[in-house]
């Protein structure tokens, strides 16, 4: 059973981004399994390092719902959006809400996923993560159990959309997921490491860093179209991983499209840099139209 929280009942602890969503849906009844004893409190802050708002210390996974506005034709398509942030935080606006609002105005019901994260001790998750990355091997090891929890949250989000498809005017064969950076790992986990019946019908991976272990997983039984986008000058050196995922899909004969921009860096999301990469969302919409997922 899922719980819907009316906006008027939100407490002062609710983050400002929540007020923009029509609904906030908790994905679990009670505590999420595996993190029942977590004591950290969810918070939101402007990360000066990332130049955007981020959410951190998520312990109660949920989705923010952005329904198709009145007067806009509902395409029947729904998409779960998994923001990135190195499993330390979520770039909730640039890699979540901004895209959700844009797609909802194009007839797609969007669900921004807040999945579980590493605990942030300070009130500056961006700086804390960069400090941890000085020992990248140790940091990646620390994320292993969190990745599994986040992937579980991604599967629960897809399950919620499938089970409530009629409520939102969604067709069950038009439910997909898009992830940015760490969120891309969450998205690809729902495709490549999923024993659930609630698998996405399409997937998009934006400057993702899919692990070698995940890449060894077999392709999904269901032919799943994949959209990939990244920049060659990614500061985290993740561009090759996007190419590896592309090759996996291509060799399997599955529909796949790759956009690799020369410049753009890591974490460009819905931000603007006056570069060709700024138009990546237009290319994503072209791809959705090509697969008859958007008018």
Image (spheres, rainbow, N blue to C red):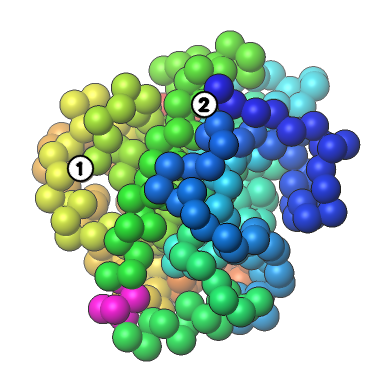
Q: Residues within 10 Å of mark 2 (few under 14, many from 20)?
A: some
Quarter-wise, where is residue 244 in the image? Answer: bottom left
Instruction: Residue 235 in the image: state x and y as whole percent.
Output: 40, 79
Is residue 137 part of the magenta span, yes or no?
yes
Instruction: Residue 215 in the image: state x and y as whole percent.
Output: 18, 52
Q: Can residue 279 be seen by looking at this rendering? A: no
Q: Residue at x 34, y 76 (%)?
A: 139
- Please tell me which residue lies in front, 259 or 193: 193
Quarter-wise, where is residue 152 in the image? Answer: top left
Q: Which numbered dot is residue 249?
A: 1
Q: Residue at x 69, y 19 (%)?
A: 73
Gap in angstroms between the C-alphas marked 2 and 1 = 27 Å
Q: Quadrant of the C terminus?
A: top right
Q: Which numbered dot is residue 160?
A: 2
Per the image, label 2 sits on a secondary structure element best described as helix
Q: Residue at x 30, y 61 (%)?
A: 144
- Please tell me which residue lies in front, 14 or 293: 14
Q: Can residue 154 be seen by looking at this rendering? A: yes
Quarter-wise, where is residue 124 in the image? Answer: bottom right
In this picture, which residue range is highlighted in magenta?
Answer: 136-140
For the stretch drawn in magenta, the main secondary structure is helix
Instruction: Residue 261 in the image: state x and y as whole percent.
Output: 41, 65
- Is residue 278 toward the left or the right of residue 159 in the image? right
Instruction: Residue 118 in the image: state x and y as whole percent.
Output: 46, 65
- Please tell me which residue lies in front, 271 or 274: 271
């Amino acid at each position: 059973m899922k719980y819907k929280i009316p906006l008027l009942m939100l407490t002062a602890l609710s983050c400002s981004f929540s007020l923009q969503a029509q609904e906030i849906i908790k994905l679990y009844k009670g505590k999420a399994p595996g993190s029942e004893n977590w004591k950290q409190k969810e918070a939101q802050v402007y990360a000066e390092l990332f130049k955007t708002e981020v959410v951190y210390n998520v312990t109660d996974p949920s989705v923010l719902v952005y329904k198709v506005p009145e007067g806009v034709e509902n395409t029947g398509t729904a998409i779960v959006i998994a923001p990135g942030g190195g499993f330390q935080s979520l770039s909730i606006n640039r890699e979540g809400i901004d895209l959700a609002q844009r797609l909802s105005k194009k007839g797609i019901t969007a669900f921004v996923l807040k999945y579980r994260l590493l605990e942030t001790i300070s009130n500056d998750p961006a700086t804390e993560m960069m400090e941890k990355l000085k020992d990248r091997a140790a940091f990646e090891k620390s994320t292993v159990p969190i990745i599994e929890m986040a992937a579980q949250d991604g599967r629960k989000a897809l399950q919620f959309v499938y089970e409530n498809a009629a409520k939102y005017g969604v067709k069950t064969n038009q439910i997909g997921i898009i992830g940015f950076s760490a969120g891309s790992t969450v998205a690809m986990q729902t495709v490549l490491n999923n024993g659930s019946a609630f698998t996405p019908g399409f997937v998009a991976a934006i400057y993702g860093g899919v692990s070698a272990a995940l890449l060894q997983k077999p392709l999904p039984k269901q032919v799943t179209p994949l959209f990939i986008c990244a920049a060659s000058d990614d500061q985290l050196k993740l561009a090759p991983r996007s190419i590896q995922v592309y090759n996996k899909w291509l060799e399997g004969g599955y529909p796949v499209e790759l956009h690799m921009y020369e410049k753009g860096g890591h974490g460009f999301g819905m931000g603007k840099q006056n570069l060709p990469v700024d138009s990546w969302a237009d290319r994503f919409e072209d791809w959705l139209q090509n697969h008859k997922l958007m008018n």
